[in-house]
Amino acid sequence: MYPVNRSSSRLKLRELAHDDVDAVLAIYGSPAATEHLSFEPRSREQVEQIVSRSVASAAESPRTEYALAVVQRDTNDLIGFGRIATDPHQPRGATFGFALRPDTWGAGLGLESVQLLLGVGFEELELHRIWGARSPHNKASAKTLTAA
């Protein structure tokens, strides 16, 4: 499925583009945003590689990764990153995760992002099972995933 375009009242998901590097760096380069992720803050060069790889993976067939920009509808600012990756061992199964820019935390945008990602997975990709990835120490993410 390409391109992904899904929206809610405040947010939309869209495909990543090469000019999103600086906005993704504000997330993946942030010690606060990456505190509970599975990696240390990334450099600009690393983020460029991630974005390039994500843009390229969108054109693969079959597509196994959906790396998507989380964008505010009113400003078009990229404030987050969501990813759905199909599981080669589980037909119709996938994992997903998300990260938001720290200055957007606490406004319910995480829940809205998760709901959009799950909508893509269950409704558009017709998956049967999606596992959420999170750190066991990230209580806010646990609350968000439980509420979704």
Image: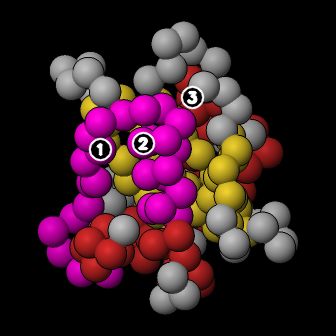
Name the outermost residue toward the top.
Answer: 61
Query: Where does residue 22 sit, x and y in percent of width and height?
Result: 71, 56
Q: Which residues are magenta?
A: 113-141
Depth-wise, is mark 3 or mark 1 nearer the camera?
A: 1
Which residue has dot 3 on it?
A: 53
Amino acid residing under circle 3: Arg
Please report contact status of discs 1 and 2: CB closer than 8 Å, yes or no: yes
Which residue has dot 1 on it?
A: 130
Q: Residues within 10 Å of mark 3 (few under 14, many from 20)?
A: few
Name the outermost residue toward the right.
Answer: 75
Q: As rendered, which of 21 and 146 lies closer to the eye? A: 146
Which residue has dot 2 on it?
A: 122
Q: Residues within 10 Å of mark 1 (few under 14, many from 20)?
A: some
Which badge, 3 or 1, is on the more N-terminal residue? 3
x 18%, y 75%: residue: 137
For the residue labelled by badge 3, is the local secondary structure a helix, a strand or a loop?
Answer: helix
For the residue labelled by badge 1, is the local secondary structure a helix, a strand or a loop?
Answer: strand
User: Is residue 128 depicted above or below 8 in this figure?
Assistant: above
Mark drawn on residue 93: none
User: Is residue 141 depicted above or below 21 in this figure?
Assistant: below
Depth-wise, is mark 1 or mark 2 nearer the camera?
A: 2
| Quadrant where the image shows the N terminus | top right
